[in-house]
Amino acid sequence: MGESTEAAVCREAKEETGLEIDLVGLVGVYSDPTRDPRGHVVSIGYLAIGSGALQSGSDARSADVFPADRLPSLAFDHEKIIHDAIRLRDSCNDQFKV
């Protein structure tokens, strides 16, 4: 509460990964009431470029980087969000390729 989603994602990225991020674009809003069996959760995905030293924050045991073609098993609809982000990345100028 009290901050934009853009400010919140930058703050959360710093807190949970140690990375500063620059937002490139909105990936999508994910609001299917059945996407999370724990309850109705809305997620907003952003494509971003990160810089800094990757480290896990308070909500994660570890933080790692994976090639897009070798992702680990993901919860809920997170694989769809990642694939949507890859499509957005690929449609952007080469300067945004990660």
Image (spheres, helix red, strand yellow):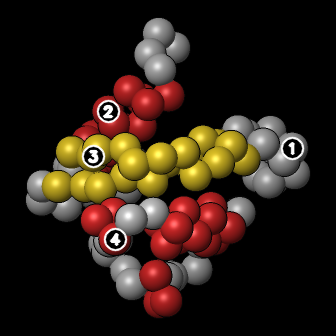
Q: Earlier in the sequence, mark 2 or mark 1?
A: 2
Please tell me whether mark 4 sits on a helix, a strand or a loop.
Answer: helix
Where does label 4 land, which residue? 94
Mark nearer the viewer, 4 or 3:
4
Mark nearer the viewer, 2 or 3:
3
Q: Earlier in the sequence, mark 4 or mark 1?
A: 1
Residue 24 pos. (x, y %): 39, 48
Residue in the foreground of this view, choosing between 82 and 74:
82
Residue 77 pos. (x, y %): 71, 63
Does residue 57 show up?
A: no
Distance between the Cα atoms at labels 3 and 1? 29 Å
Please tell me whether mark 2 sits on a helix, a strand or a loop.
Answer: helix
Where does label 2 land, which residue? 11
Residue 6 pos. (x, y %): 44, 31
Q: What's under tag 1, amino acid-wise?
A: Pro
Distance between the Cα atoms at labels 4 and 2? 26 Å
Residue for point 47% across, 20% down: 4
Label 4 crowding class (10 Å Cα cut-off): few <14, some 14-19, many 20+? few
Residue 81 pos. (x, y %): 62, 61
Q: What's under tag 3, amino acid-wise?
A: Ile
Distance between the Cα atoms at labels 2 and 3? 9 Å
**Would you say the residues marked 4 and 1 are in contact, meaning their CB atoms lie under 8 Å apart?**
no
Distance between the Cα atoms at labels 4 and 3? 18 Å
In the figure, 34 relative to 2: above or below? below
In the figure, 76 relative to 27: above or below? below
Residue for point 34% across, 71% down: 94
Please tell me whether mark 3 sits on a helix, a strand or a loop.
Answer: strand
Where does label 1 land, which residue? 33
